[in-house]
Amino acid sequence: MASASTSELSDSFQNKSHLLVAAIDFGTTYSGYAFSAVSKKDDIRVYTDWGNVVAVPSAQKTPTVVLMRNEGNKCLAFGYDALHDYSELDEDEIDGYSIYQKFKMSLHTTKNIGRATYVPAKRGNATSAMGLFSYGLKYLAEHLIGTVGKETGESVTKDQIRWVITVPAIWSDAAKQFMRQAAFQAELIPTKDSDSLVIALEPEAASLYCRQLDINHLLCTGDSKMGVGTKYLVLDCGGGTLDVTVHHLKEGNKIAELYKATGADLGGSKVDENFIRLLEAILGDSVITSFQRSCASDFLSMMSLFEQKKRVVDPVKKQSLNIPLSSALGDLYNDMTGDRLKNAISPEWKDKGVAFKNGLLCIPHDMILGVFAPVVDKIVSHVRKLLQVEQVKAISHILVVGGFADSPYLQYELKREFGAIKKIIIPPDASSCVMKGATMFGHDPSSIISRNSRKTYGTDVYPMFDPTKHDAGKTKMYGDKLRAEGLFRTWIKQGEEVRMDKALTFSHVPVTPDQTNMSIGLYCSDHIDPRYCSDSNVEQLGNITVQLPGSGLDRKVEVKIMFGGTEITVEGRDCRPGGAKTRTTVNFLSD
């Protein structure tokens, strides 16, 4: 655990009105949490004992893996516990269980995200993404509450905690809402729209944490001091995604976003995929495919070991990668080929330096660099292109965070490419600074004073048809009036700076005396100035539903939409004298 005595933390809970801020970093490959008491917000604690199940010292995160019993679709274990329990299953039991890994990527790659979204298993049956996420969040939350109890001697309940869940900045509004729904289903919050949950953007969280670090403890190039006025790029290289934001450090230690968040499907898991392809090339596609299917526990253990090896592959130290191959793989290879695994290396691969020695597959240095190169090259290319954007040219620092930031190869290439023109900063705790910063964000969400809109947002309107302005093919009769159908009315343009405290306000009146609610379509586009909501470059995000209290045509409801936060939020108010807030919901999910 982090420093600060148990008694000091316990003192923070003597007054039960004090809340705890707890941040859950639910990652593609690994997950963890951090927390601090409101009265001692700078005393951020990170749980570091995840690895005691598998004798991994000081593990700040646990694998994002869920074990499920197929009968009844019952989730049984999470993290190292899931891997351990799965490895203990007898061969005749294993078909009754499924194991799920790296399922977070489904929220980035699925176009229409809904409560019924399904994800495939590493081995076993496809299952509900909502079930997996809610189980994982509940497991981590309950583990955290248990840790707080042990550390403080005080019991804390979920409703005394302000929860923070981290997500990539490039995630869709639907994906963010999905995580909120999962937190509600996991019983972290009492209602889906509860302000007891804050969604934090991962690169922003890292930025908040790193702005206050002692630069003498950073791996950096050049004079890396950051003060008011500093403009810098945050490169969050996680397990699943590359997530990039551009920030400006303002007075009062506040942060403004200079350019919209960008990124790609370029996390450390892409290196894993390349490694698997290399194994397939060396040992045979069918062998590795069968190994994943028939010996899933051994395969997952091998990939966990490779995850550790990724942190030592260095372009300067020309060392081969030696990885043990399990006896189960040897038995499988013998069953499939009639030969021993040590004879699997063909003369062609031997000529390239591949060898099998004492149960270890030895891969030469240049070949293992080839596993990393396609991913690292694309990350470098992404940064290079960003630095050509007008709003980004002026940055002086590149802050590199995330689990993949620990890769010496990635560090080397970033410094080689940009070290002469930008100051490269790599925190020593690059993989944990997101959850630490997310805890800070939970204490003060106003730390980020403005963001740049990633998309153009608006709604559909139906004005009177004007042949000089509107497309004659997109009209509709409403009563005896010919109206243009579904024009895109822009609220926020792509790239526009949106302050945290800015709200778009408009009013609506009922169409009929007995109307009880109204629905407002919410649309978005990657174009600056879309014309019609039916255009191919426009998609409907969802609907805003506002309750209309009372009856009659003389009613009016004021609607406020806030785009400057990490989530789009909506508020409605009855405009009649003494009118109160009216129930307002926004839905981005497809079901």
Image: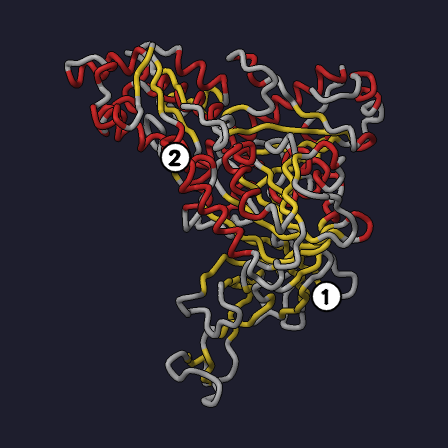
The amino acid type found where label 2 is placed reads Val
10 Å neighbourhood of mark 1: few (<14), some, or many (≥20)? some
Residue 453 on image: x %, y %: 59, 59
What colour scheme was applied to this rendering of the protein? secondary structure
**Towards the viewer: 118 or 276:** 276
Q: Determine the secondary structure under disc 2.
A: helix
Extreme residue in the left direction: 338
**Towards the viewer: 243 or 445:** 243
Q: Which residue is mark 2?
A: 371
Q: Is residue 68 visible?
A: no
User: For the image shown, how many numbered marks are present on the structure?
Assistant: 2
Q: Residue at x 43, y 22 (%)?
A: 67
Q: Are marks 1 and 2 in contact (CB under 8 Å)?
A: no
Q: Residue at x 51, y 63 (%)?
A: 523
Residue 462 on image: x %, y %: 50, 76
Extreme residue in the bottom direction: 468
Badge number at residue 123: none
Q: Which residue is mark 1?
A: 575
The amino acid type found where label 1 is placed reads Cys
Residue 198 on image: x %, y %: 66, 42
Name above or below for residue 577 compared with residue 408.
Answer: below
10 Å neighbourhood of mark 2: few (<14), some, or many (≥20)? some
Foreground: disc 1 or disc 2: 2
Q: Relative to residue 369, is residue 390 drawn left or right? A: right
Locate the N terminus and report the quarter of the image it occupies. Answer: top right
Question: First in sequence: mark 1 or mark 2?
Answer: 2
Q: Relative to residue 329, is residue 253 drawn left or right? A: right
Q: Relative to residue 336, is residue 137 drawn left or right? A: right
Q: Is residue 453 visible?
A: yes
Residue 352 on image: x %, y %: 29, 28
Q: Relative to residue 288, is residue 254 drawn left or right? A: right
**Towards the viewer: 197 or 454:** 454
